[in-house]
Amino acid sequence: MRMVTVSSIEIDAYSVAAMRGDVLPTCIRLAQTREEKAWHDRLEIVLSVGPACPRDVLDRACKLMPHATEPLLLRAAASLRRAAMAKSETQHDTHEENARADLERVMRLDPSDAAARALHPHHGVSSARMSVAPSARL
């Protein structure tokens, strides 16, 4: 198994293609990272490219590739970005729920997908509740 490293130029190229409506190259590259268990690269691509994709393109990709985890991950990352930028709690919750549904589907399709667990609102980094000890508060 060879070590895969994703470059910023590569990510930029995938983002431009995605903005133009072509997520197939990204999905192929993500499938390669899954095969090689290059989880860090997979997560980096998903977080960088997913939010650049138009929603209708991601919806179409998910429909055309119903058993593929890659378009679901991209759509989840886009939903999480929209949740983070939401102007209301209702919008935030709606986008987060959409992301959660896609990520849970990814975890059912491929339980070993570390990227899905890392992104999931209740399993990943966003679920960690940082508490500050009273003595550390100013």
Image (cartoon, rainbow, N blue to C red):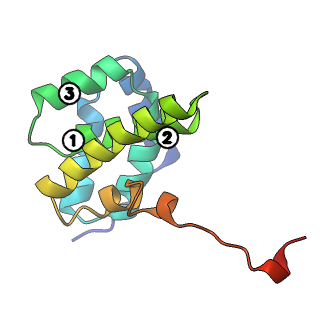
Q: What residue type is labelled 2?
A: Ile
Q: From the viewer's perspective, is the residue at label 3 or at label 2 nearer?
A: 3
Q: Mark 3 points at which residue?
A: 61
Q: What element carries label 3?
A: helix
Tell me if mark 1 has few (under 14), some (14-19) or many (20+) residues whose alpha carbon lies within 10 angstroms of its own: few
Q: Which of 135 and 85 is in front in this view?
A: 135
User: Residue at left 19%, top 31%?
Assistant: 62
* Residue found at x 33% / y 68%: 3
Q: Which of marks 3 and 1 is in front?
A: 3
**Residue 53 figure quarter:** top left
Residue denoted by label 1: 28
> Can residue 22 be seen by looking at this rendering?
no
> Label 1 amino acid?
Ile
Using the image as rendered, state which of residue 135 and residue 2 is in the foreground.
135
Residue 9, labelled with which disc? Answer: 2
Mark 1–mark 2 Cα distance, whole angstroms, equals 17 Å
- Give x and y (percent) for residue 127: 48, 61
